[in-house]
Image (cartoon, rainbow, N blue to C red):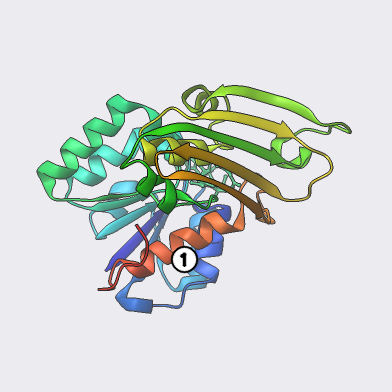
Amino acid sequence: MIVGILGCGAIANIIVNNFLARENGINIKYFYDHDIKKAENLARISDGIAVLNIDDMVDHVDLVLEAASPISVEKFALNILKKGKDIIVMSIGALMDKKLRNELIEVATEHNSRIFAPSGAIVGLDGIKAASIGNIRKVNLTTRKPPRSLGKDNNEEEVLYEGKASEAVKKFPTNINVAAALSIACNRDVDVKIIIDPSVDKNVHEVIVEGDFGQFKTRTENLPCETNPKTSMLAAFSAIKLLKSLNENFIMGT
Ligand SMILES: NC(=O)C1=CN([C@@H]2O[C@H](COP(=O)(O)OP(=O)(O)OC[C@H]3O[C@@H](n4cnc5c(N)ncnc54)[C@H](OP(=O)(O)O)[C@@H]3O)[C@@H](O)[C@H]2O)C=CC1
Ligand SMILES: O=C([O-])CC(=O)C(=O)O
């Protein structure tokens, strides 16, 4: 399976540095970013090809791994799927737009392509998907990030946002994709609180779910990526795990 990466920043770097060439029959070969230097850097590390135009990548791959921005999903995903290519979407916030999501699913169905959304920086998506088979009464996400992860310099704790996931992804498009992942997993616009917390040095996501199944609470304490502290290492690791699983015949978890 030939893979191309769209967006050559923090997540793409971790993927390339933790993925052996041609592992599990997967060859990450093409790289595109609007900064060609970033694409060239990853191409050099992995003996791949940097392209100036995204079509030069899409035409040659089986799957595009998007690790760029929600806008890049709006801009490129439809065309990728129309060409019969699969896509892994990291900027899941873009998929909170139901119109876009339905359009992408329709085109994917028509062209026999697939859309994958990895669990990213959060744990518990397996549980919430299973829970959604029954009635869910409550889903709360509280995200705490150190000031530098949110581009702030607070000395004291501050609630940056409290409201629905659909608004959170619009206000903080590159900071709260996890809220979109949770919402889509259980088909509900979940309640979100984002806190700037100078007392933490990790990106912390706490989730409480209550429903017919009972209840669960998860707490993820993520180490931020060195080059982009907004983003957690686990998000990149989840993409690697998903990539590897595409050629496997045994699927673990919901
Ligand atoms: N699902 C999840 O749990 C998580 C998702 N994410 C999301 O994943 C995405 C990637 O994260 P990360 O690697 O940290 O981001 P980075 O900002 O480190 O890297 C993204 C790269 O993609 C480039 N880029 C952005 N938009 C476009 C575009 N339209 N065309 C070409 N290149 C583009 C950026 O350029 P430039 O810097 O010039 O804009 C940058 O070089 C983000 O949207 C982020 O919010 C992150 C963490 C968790
Ligand atoms: O990486 C994280 O911890 C969360 C994040 O940025 C996002 O959900 O967009």
Camera-nearest residue between 232 and 185:
185
Residue 150's quadrant in the figure?
top right
Q: Secondary structure at mark 1?
A: helix
Q: Is the residue 97 above or below the residue 110 in the image?
A: above
Camera-nearest residue between 215 and 195:
215
Q: Is the residue 223 above or below the residue 144 in the image?
A: below
Q: Residue at x 41, y 34 (%)?
A: 136
- Give the x, y percent position of residue 210: 49, 38
- Category of crowding for the residue at label 1, using alpha-carbon neighbours closer than 10 angstroms: few (below 14), some (14–19), many (at least 20): many
Q: Relative to residue 242, is residue 148 drawn left or right?
A: right
Q: Residue at x 55, y 70 (%)?
A: 17
Quick one: quadrant of the N terminus? bottom left
> Is residue 34 in view from this perspective?
no
- Give the x, y percent position of residue 184: 38, 37
- Give the x, y percent position of residue 73: 37, 38
Outermost residue on the right side: it is: 155
Q: Relative to residue 101, is residue 184 drawn left or right?
A: right
Q: Relative to residue 192, is residue 26 drawn left or right?
A: left
> Which residue matches tag 1?
43
Camera-nearest residue between 16 and 239:
239
Could you tell me the amino acid type at mark 1? Ala
Q: Is the residue 127 above or below the residue 137 in the image?
A: below
